[in-house]
Image (cartoon, rainbow, N blue to C red):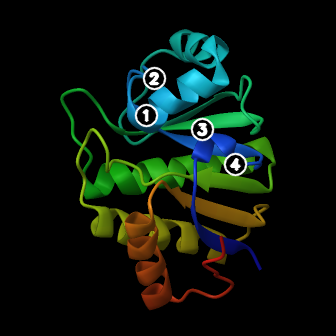
Amino acid sequence: MPEIRIVQGDITEMGVDAIVNAANNDLILGSGVAGAIRRRGGPAIQEECHKIGRIPVGEAAVTGGGSLPAGFVIHAASMGFSHPTTDESLRASVRNSLLRAEELGIKTVAFPALGTGVSGFPLERCAEIMIGEISDHLAGPSGLSEVSIVLFDSAARGVFADVLSRANPPGTGSGG
């Protein structure tokens, strides 16, 4: 049974098959998680994003991982410059990120807390939506063996761990 893990750390250091980027729909790697991915992964990731161009809010696009440990970056556009993250855009971007991971045939993927940085989406609501979408996806046929949610600080990790324990879907853990 696939596992959901809640971990504290730096998503750019995760040794998983793919990491998810908290992206805007123009795929410009500016600040926050996107900026960290650009700095650590090198210019190739942003260059690939420029080739892809704008995607709809709620969609997800894939690039290589550049010099990151992860082989791929899945860019989840939960927001646009004039479109803050909403419940629906967060749901759609998580769902589409998981679909991109399945299309890649990978086993492990790590998400940040999408939409909670620049877009200012509430952390607990983010946790509820993300854990709900990931749990729903893993309850069906899936090639994924593990989905991690990587939080930068212990307070955020605690919020996600609490939401996961309340949701208590089968096969979950909060290791880290």
Compared to residue 1, the image places residue 170 above or below, namely below
Left/right placement of residue 98 relative to residue 79 reads right
Tell me the distance, in whole angstroms, between the alpha carbons under discs 4 and 1: 18 Å
Tell me the distance, in whole angstroms, between the alpha carbons under discs 2 and 1: 7 Å
Label 3: which residue? 74
What secondary structure is marked by label 4?
A: loop
Where residue 14 is drawn, which disc sits there? Answer: 4
What secondary structure is marked by label 1?
A: strand
Q: Are marks 4 and 1 in contact (CB under 8 Å)?
A: no
The earlier-in-sequence mark between 1 and 3 is 1
Q: Amino acid at mark 2?
A: Leu
Q: Residues within 10 Å of mark 1 (few under 14, many from 20)?
A: many
Left/right placement of residue 41 relative to residue 156 reads right
The earlier-in-sequence mark between 3 and 4 is 4
The earlier-in-sequence mark between 3 and 2 is 2
Q: Are marks 4 and 2 in contact (CB under 8 Å)?
A: no
- Residue drawn at x 18%, y 29% is 82
Q: Residues within 10 Å of mark 2 (few under 14, many from 20)?
A: many
Relative depth, front residue between 18 and 161 = 161
Q: Amino acid at mark 4?
A: Met
In the picture, the quarter occupied by the C terminus is: bottom right
What secondary structure is marked by label 2?
A: loop
Label 2: which residue? 29
Q: Amino acid at mark 3?
A: Ile
- Residue drawn at x 45%, y 47% is 93
Q: Are marks 3 and 2 in contact (CB under 8 Å)?
A: no
Tell me the distance, in whole angstroms, between the alpha carbons under discs 4 and 2: 18 Å
The earlier-in-sequence mark between 2 and 1 is 1
Label 1: which residue? 23
The earlier-in-sequence mark between 4 and 2 is 4
